[in-house]
Image: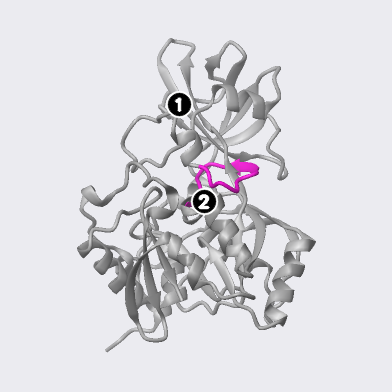
Amino acid sequence: MSRSPDSLPTSAFDYELPSRLIAHHPVEPRDQSRLMVLRRDSDSIEHRHFHDLAEMIPPGDALVLNETRVLPARLLGRRSTGGEAEVLLLQPVDGLGYDGTDWSALVRPGVKLKPGRTVKIAPELEVEILDVRSDGSRTVRLHTELPVLTALKQFGRMPLPPYIDRAVEPADADRYQTVFARSEGSVAAPTAGLHFTDALLRQIEAAGVTLIRIVLHVGAGTFRPVEAEDPSEHVMHSEAYDVSEDAAGQLNRVRGAGGKIWAVGTTVARTLETICDQRGAFKAGRGWTDIYIRPAYHFRGVDHLITNFHLPRSTLLMLVAAFAGYDSVMKAYRTAIDDEYRFYSYGDAMVAL
């Protein structure tokens, strides 16, 4: 007996991935990565390259990009005892600005970093532990005479995901950002956007496609697996988004003219679903979203989804399964493994049509 999509347990989104398929470095140039094309109407799979998107997106459609920029939010320093310590800034405690001194953060070693302890990052930057949160994270305060973003750029490191098991390299400062990144605030890249080059975007726009730019700042919760076997028991993390009046107007004009909306990544998909009403109209807004999309969610704001291959048991994989169908997506993942696609942040991509 088949189960309804909304009754799928978390274990249904598990899969075995050979470690050799985890991409530790990106493909060069960006748009030479592989692209799996999953057609929902026929449940068929094609194998292309990312630059082929230029001939796949029809004139009159819209390509929606997340312009968030990854913060160098990984701070390495020493405790007052001389021991090594690490602080990963997550998001400001108050408001949507990223120039404040109080942040939520993950720290190591957690047992040593209790309230009142400090970590010296540099002569110009020190981190004070203020309190321990219920989820084990910390509230910290940055002590610096520099503007906070200046201090982070000077002393912070790019927060590569934990499955990229190597030291941060100078090239990561550029390659772990999209070419259209402008609004600083993420602790992880919107990875579907990493495949675009400036030339590819110009080619797509010249073909009559509207490029629309929004912002959703990616939080560390994007990597957190769903631990509960019942997905409904998972507490979704919140992320800050910003959609301008101009962007919402462009979305509505494309929709009104019969065009389709192509979401570049799960971050864009979550944002569009947050600002799209039951009639399919988009409304500008700025705030926090904790929208949790899994089968059998009904999409209102997204017609096509460009995405990377995601971690097992993740809310990102659940979102893709909700969009393209659970059986089709899990078949696509098995095909990707058999055909040795490269997985995760620096890996290959898929588009669900």
Tag 1 residue: 86
Q: Is residue 181 left or right of residue 85?
A: right
Q: How many dots with numbers?
A: 2
Q: Nearer the viewer, residue 86 or 117?
A: 86
Give the vertical position of 164 relative to 33 (above or below): above
**Residue 291 seen in this snapshot:** no
- Location of residue 278 (image quadrant): bottom right
Q: Nearer the viewer, residue 314 or 40?
A: 40
Q: Where residue 66 sits: x, y (%)?
A: 60, 55
Q: Nearer the viewer, mark 2 or mark 1?
A: 2
**Marks 2 and 1, Cα distance to the nearest angstrom?**
33 Å
Majority secondary structure in the magenta region: loop
> Looking at the picture, how far across and down is residue 314, in whole percent?
40, 59
314 relative to 69 in the view: left or right: left
Is any part of residue 174 visible from this angle? yes
* Above or below, comparing residue 259 to residue 25 in the picture: below
First to last magenta residue range? 177-191
Q: Is residue 270 magenta?
A: no
Under circle 2, the secondary element is loop
- Of 205 and 353, nearer the camera is 205
Q: Is residue 344 left or right of residue 178?
A: left
Residue 72: percent from left, percent from top:
54, 32
Q: CB under 8 Å between callouts 2 and 1?
A: no
